[in-house]
Amino acid sequence: MQKKGMVYLVGAGPGDPELITVKGKRLLSRAEVVVYDYLANEKLLAHVPPTATFIYAGKKGGSTHTHTQAEINRMLVDYALAGKIVVRLKGGDPFIFGRGGEEIEELAGHGVSFEVVPGVTSASAAATYAGVPITHREFTSSVAFVTGHEDPNKKESRIAWDKLATGAGTLVFYMGIKNLPNITANLIKHGRDPQTPVAVVRWASTPQQRSVVGTLENITEVVRESGITPPALVVVGEVVNLRKTINWYEKRPLFGKKILVTRSRDQASELVQSLEDLGANCLEGATISLQDPPDWAPLDQALANIAAFQWLLFTSPNAVNYFFRRLGTLGLDSRSLHGPKIAVVGTATAECLQMHGIKADLLPEKFTAEGLAETLLAQGVKGKKILLPRALKARNVLPDSLRGAGAEVDVVPVYQNVRPPMEDKIRQALKEGDVDLITFTSSSTVTNLLDLLDLKPEELHSLLAGIKIAAIGPITAATAEKAGLKVDIQPQTHTIPALVTAIAEYFAVSDQV
Ligand code: SAH
């Protein structure tokens, strides 16, 4: 018997990909087909198995629709009847101005099984993220969600403006930007005070959020002047005044800052997440991608002879991860490392090692290769055999100084850095001056970005003019400075959390002056 298909109509939430429900996320992870809208954050697609069929259903106000509503309905029915688990992912809540009802009617008409998962609607998120409590005991005890999309020339409006204007304390208009003059005029005409405060919020709950406030009388002008375009919501009511005290989202330290993160994609997430938690809008422009080394033989030979080593050194979490992956491939585990003592360059590497069940024996005071060399030399390394698994290309400070002190050092590659091509959106953002800060977390992120840009010094200078530079530590900073860049931010400790704090502190000060 054929497997029975199913359609889940899932609310994606307003924009922030963490504002989907737990249930919605779980269903995405089971989807065989996902049909998603313009307003559903694409980051949510990361929850969907890569083997699924992904269909963009489009629908951006004003632009040509990618699929008509009839086509979308047809697709949902066809996939479900073919036995697939289909997730229909819609922005906000599917039943609030989302045409979810129409899609479900179609499914029901064809005998297709379905479930609906509500979502955080954009009205609620826009108000909250603009610092406006949508109700408040002192100001309003009712809210109305209204479509602002009605054709203003329509003779018979389906909105009872006379009742609406003063009938609900807070009014939230979806799709109302084009029609704003008409909406405000209708409300004033039917008795709402022209001085009623109004907030307009674009791309609410995302790093691109922008909001403006005014009154019923002047908001059209304010929106026109600020250049705010859809998607945006219009919140009308006395509660908007509370924004003065409650506006939290836009007051986060890095709100509105566009930050180019040049780390490799698999490593960028911690940095990106921490910066975004502080409100930054991160652009991920990987300048590095990691791969297996060209040859595993040097490591394999060292592992076969591991008992001969007194020290095993790790100078990055990448080295740890690649090393252990190979260990696993060889059918070994951490028990085979019981012989040598193990030293790491810094806390991130130590934590990574801990994930593999091993506590580092030595952590230097200064988290650099020099710091590690110094600490090891102080212990005495003469005649000691030391294994250093690391990137194919790396600085020789550590092995050189250990050898200089009489150690025998085996440097074996466990991964290599390769340079991916530069994405157009990154080049574009830099060209348009749409970047406030670039973060460099290793020397290769600097050299790779510059190689990718491939510019003459004066062109580079003018491209990067006005862009701040943050470097994780002195080596990275020196590489940047040697290339003619001015480093504005450098943390005391060379870790990602310290880098993030230094960036936040820098802007807290520079934005005040
Ligand atoms: N079902 C959706 C609404 C779809 S109608 C929900 O529950 O939110 C589309 C309108 O929603 C847009 O024109 C805009 O007015 C509003 N909208 C959706 N997401 C938004 C966002 N992140 N910021 C501001 N407005 C948004």
Image (cartoon, rainbow, N blue to C red):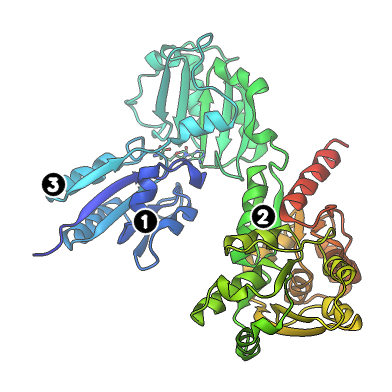
Residue 66, compared with residue 236, is above or below; it is below
Q: Image point 23% across, 61% down: which residue?
A: 84
Residue 46, compared with residue 394, is above or below; it is above
Q: Where is residue 409 in the image (x, y as percent from the top left)?
A: 79, 84
Q: Image point 78% across, 48% down: which residue?
A: 503
**Residue on which the image places disc 1:** 29
Q: What residue type is labelled 2?
A: Leu
- Mark 2–mark 3 distance (CA, rounded to whole Å): 48 Å
- Mark 2–mark 1 distance (CA, rounded to whole Å): 25 Å
Q: Which of 494 and 214 is in front in this view?
A: 494
Helix, strand or loop at mark 2:
helix
Q: Image point 55% across, 11% down: which residue?
A: 193
Q: Quadrant of residue 116?
A: top left
Task: Please tell me in which quarter of the rendered image ligand 1 is found.
Answer: top left
**Marker disc for residue 271:** 2
- Mark 1–mark 3 distance (CA, rounded to whole Å): 27 Å
Q: Nearer the viewer, residue 268 or 285?
A: 268
First in sequence, mark 2 or 3: give its number. 3
Query: Residue 385 vs residue 39: left or right?
Result: right
